[in-house]
Amino acid sequence: MDMRKPAPRLAACIAALGALVSSACGGGGSDLPFGTPTPATAVASLTPTREPSPTPTVSLASLEDARTALRAGNYVEAAVLFDAIANTATDGQLQAEAWMGASIARYQHGDLAGAIVDLEAAFTA
């Protein structure tokens, strides 16, 4: 078997491929149907009417404080802390966890109706 015969054939294929790529990519863009893009005009920025209040941050430490109050049997304090977390949290999982904690605190305190409301809020958070 002579290994020299495929080489000219391969060289011809590579040359044809190179010519095809060169013709497809060449041209420099001078004959494009559209002109040079112009920058868009600036839109006037809106100014707020009043200073926004800072968003309260909910930390895991405050969640731990609520859990500690619940374990200590301070159900009213725990419910208040869990409510504050649930009402200010932006993360759905954290909200659900806080509503669940508030539900447990209310149930332990004897507020069955409040516990059910908080439990429903936990499922929809």
Image (cartoon, grey):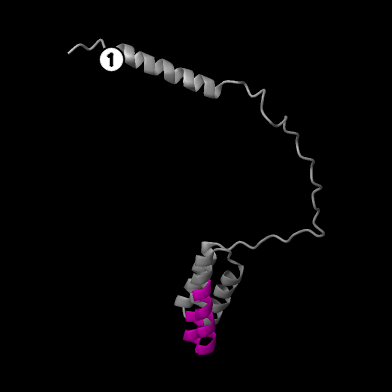
Secondary structure beneath label 1 = helix
> For residue 104: magenta?
yes
Q: Is residue 26 above or below residue 4?
A: below
In-front residue for pair 82/2: 2
Whether residue 123 is visible, yes or no, is: yes
Residue at 79% x, 46% y is 43
Q: Would residue 78 be found to the left or right of residue 5 on screen?
A: right
Residue at 49% x, 67% y is 64
Q: Position of residue 87 (x, y in %)?
A: 60, 71
Give the residues drawn in magenta, as a range.
103-125
> For residue 111: magenta?
yes
Q: Would residue 74 be found to the left or right of residue 55 on screen?
A: left
Q: Position of residue 110 (x, y in %)?
A: 50, 89
Which kind of residue does numbered mark 1 sit on?
Pro
Query: What residue is shown with label 1?
Result: 6
- Quarter of the image where one finds residue 81: bottom right
Q: Position of residue 36 (x, y in %)?
A: 72, 29
Whether residue 111 is visible, yes or no, is: no
Q: Is residue 21 above or below residue 61?
A: above
Residue at 51% x, 75% y is 122
Q: Position of residue 3 (x, y in %)?
A: 22, 12
